[in-house]
Amino acid sequence: MKYIGTQGFDHEQPARSGLLITNLGTPDAPDKAALKRYLREFLWDPRVVEVPRPLWWLILNLVILNVRPARSARAYRTVWSEAGSPLLVHTRAQRDALRAALAGQDVVVEFAMRYGKPSIPAVLQSMAEQGVRRLVVLPLYPQYSAATTASTFDRLAEDFTRRRWLPELRFVTHYHDHPAYVAAIADSIEAHRQAHGGADLLLFSYHGVPQRYLDEGDPYHCECLKTSRLVAERLGLTEEEYRVCFQSRFGREEWLKPYTDETLKGLPAEGVRSVQVVCPGFAADCLETLEEIGVENRDYFLHAGGEHYQYIPCLNSSAAHIDALRQVALDALGDWVASPVGRASPRP
């Protein structure tokens, strides 16, 4: 007799493999109320802000959530579209493209956000109901950091504590030096330069984290430097033709340096008249790339005497990016896929 469990599980359902891609998250709308909900969830994560909880509760609820939501809502409105936030739009498109790219392997492909919707628990439930018993989780953070990659694992593990039937799990911690990813970044820069010309300097800008995280062993800084070096080598750049910096710092604590905004303000005084900025730590364009890099930091550079500023868009759902993510996913799926055809060779 066929048995269907109380939560809708078919115990005779064939086991399938699944790929879950995740990103940071997005508010539901570009308004104060939605931003307050989103920021409360995001900033309360102890991986994101490593401050004793009682003290941080007071700062977050009495100060930050009374000031920042309105300001953030205004910024989001500048990049929002009818389809939603850029991060949501691009991540959904990446999911759809990966579904097509992996169609021959019978892999269930979904996406979720660490904060906001679609949530990791909701998507895991949907995948379980589709028969996923072997799961690859691919956070779209090329460079590992406890504040992003490990936080994703925390949410996954928290959900698993409530499940009776756990899938086999493979978790991709990083892909900062994967040849296909490096090639996709380098080729996008080269294509941009062929279409728009070159610049005096190429600036690699990554999201910052507190310097303390590096001091305590987080490899993020090192992986950002390695990504930049590999891309620069592929482009044939000398050390004088590119720099690495870090954006989006928050609070009074020292963060990874050099800071992107201060770097751009100082470049014209060094004789740099034109600059191109690329953000290889972001798998999709979002507020931090479109508004902070595309607008705010552009103004810093031009007001300081710079003449030409260009932001090179993220890879988003470009064919090269989807192929790179496909290869990373197939490396992780390994013997779980229905057919080995098209699998990438393991990295040396």
Image (cartoon, rainbow, N blue to C red):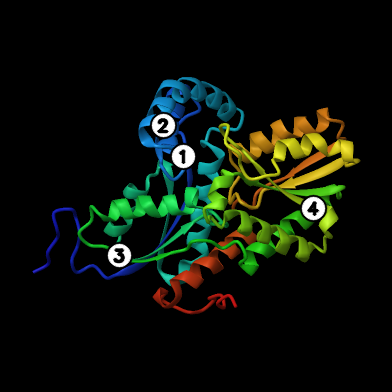
Q: Amino acid at mark 3?
A: Pro
Give the quadrant of the N terminus: bottom left
Q: Name the element at disc 3.
A: loop
Q: Amino acid at mark 1?
A: Val
Q: CA distance from mark 2 to mark 4?
A: 38 Å
Q: CA distance from mark 3 to mark 1?
A: 30 Å
Sequence-earlier tag: 1 or 2: 1
Sequence-earlier tag: 4 or 3: 3
Of circles 2 and 4, the one toward us is: 2
Q: Amino acid at mark 4?
A: Tyr
| Residue of label 4 | 242
| Residue of label 3 | 167
| Residue of label 1 | 49
| Residue of label 2 | 56
Q: Name the element at disc 1.
A: loop
User: What is the crowding at mark 3: few (fewer than 14 residues within 10 Å), some, or many (at least 20)?
Assistant: many
* In the image, residue 295 above or below residue 127: above
Of circles 4 and 3, the one toward us is: 4
- Front residue of 99/279: it is 279
Of circles 3 and 2, the one toward us is: 2
Residue 119 picture location, percent across and down: 37, 45
Q: CA distance from mark 3 to mark 2?
A: 35 Å
Residue 165 picture location, percent across and down: 22, 62
Q: CA distance from mark 4 to mark 3?
A: 44 Å
Of circles 1 and 4, the one toward us is: 1
